[in-house]
Image: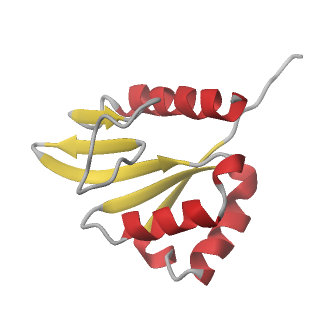
Amino acid sequence: MEQLIFHDWLINYIKNVLKNKYKDIKANIGKKEFEYKGHYPDIILQSGGFTIGIVEVITKTKINNEEIERWKQLAMLDTKLILLIPEHLKKKIADILWKERLMEKVSIATYEIKLKGL
């Protein structure tokens, strides 16, 4: 439950960060509302009526065989797939992408949360 709350919070945060770069951002937060070619990625990035990319927000609990199969399906679509992953899992996920022959089809972006002064 906590991972889901964090996942949805992060989707909303990324949507707000990217709103100046992309004219239209659709985010599936907590429910499947926005579809792209039969799939419901976490974020759909659009500009000028074109889909520029789709983003999947990855948390530690989402790294499993089912999720990897989902990445494969999304990577086969005609737009860029961006995986937003925790910085500390970058090597692990990169290894998975190489093993599954997805590295050339997927872009990786990372996030890191730092608490200072506690």
Q: Residue 2, how many percent across, how many down?
A: 71, 28
Residue 35, quarter of the rendered image = top left
Q: Residue 94, how many percent across, how many down?
A: 63, 69
Q: Is residue 96 above or below residue 47?
A: below
Q: Residue 56, how many percent across, how many down?
A: 47, 50
Q: Is residue 110 above or below residue 6?
A: below
Residue at (32% x, 29% y) in the render: 19
In the rendered image, the quadrant that contains the C terminus is: top right
Q: Is residue 30 above or below residue 88?
A: above
Query: Which one is in front, 115 or 100?
Result: 100
Residue 112, quarter of the rendered image = top right
Query: Which one is in front, 51 or 118?
Result: 51
In the displayed structure image, the side of residue 53 where residue 10 appears, left or right = right
Q: Residue furthest top?
A: 118
Query: Which one is in front, 68 or 19?
Result: 68
Residue at (56% x, 80% y) in the render: 100
Residue 26, quarter of the rendered image = top left
Residue at (17% x, 42% y) in the render: 47
In the rendered image, the quadrant that contains the N terminus is: top right
Q: Residue furthest right?
A: 118
Q: Residue 63, how many percent across, how many down?
A: 66, 57
